[in-house]
Image (tube, grey):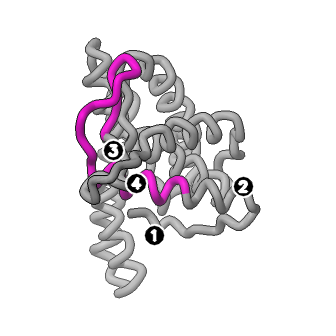
Amino acid sequence: LKSAMAWFELHEVTGEAEFLTAYQHALEAAMSSERRFLPGDANCEKVMDRLHAYAYFLEGLLPALGRPECARAFSAGLDRMAGLLREIAPQFVRSDVCAQLLRVRLLGDTLGVSPLDWDAAAYEADRTAAFHLESQDPRIAGGFGFGSKFDQPLPYVNPVSTTFAVQALAFWSDSENNAFQAPPRSLI
């Protein structure tokens, strides 16, 4: 659904109804399968991977949050995602999932759909920041690790995780300073 946001944005720029129709078709398909997507597997590592994809679904809902059913799915989705993240994190956690959840949580509040749960957001910000790496190696310095298993960091830096984490922590800093006003199109 996140990639379908491009159609929505093309509709906004061009006014072409076909683009809006394409987004709406993708939205309907995503909404019809959303409840079955999580957890979707008994293996906690696969569920964590599904949380990454589910965050894209929540991001893809942003243009449609004016629709009550989409706003409800978004708010309920935040709760489901956060619950599964906390449940699975002691065994396996991905930094990008923490960052993605924080980003959509902050956007949901800014857009007036889901009031900010400050405790949950602080947890997600802390989890995200914990993956920040210090190193003399310039390939690693300032990056964010991909994740951890049983509180042991996985041995690699991930550029996507780094990008999501930097943006999420910037959003969080702005929120703490009452300065967060990012529109949905600001998502990386």
**CA gap, disc 4 to disc 2?**
18 Å
Read off the residue under disc 4.
164
Determine contact: label 1, label 2, CB under 8 Å.
no
Read off the residue under disc 1.
185
* Front-lying residue, 177 or 118: 177
Look at the image and tell me whether residue 168 can be seen.
yes
Please give the name of the residue rendered at 38% of the width and 63% of the height, measured from the top-left corner. Answer: 188
Within-10-Å neighbours for mark 4: few <14, some 14–19, many 20+: many
Determine contact: label 3, label 1, CB under 8 Å.
no
- In this rendering, position of residue 20 left or right of residue 187: left
**CA gap, disc 3 to disc 2?**
33 Å
Please give the name of the residue rendered at 28% of the width and 12% of the height, measured from the top-left corner. Answer: 42
Residue 176 is marked as 2
Q: Which tag, 1 or 2, sits closer to the chain's start? A: 2
Q: Which tag, 3 or 2, sits closer to the chain's start? A: 3
Q: Nearer the viewer's eye, disc 3 or disc 2? A: 2
Kind of residue at disc 3: Ala
Kind of residue at disc 1: Arg
Residue 30 is marked as 3
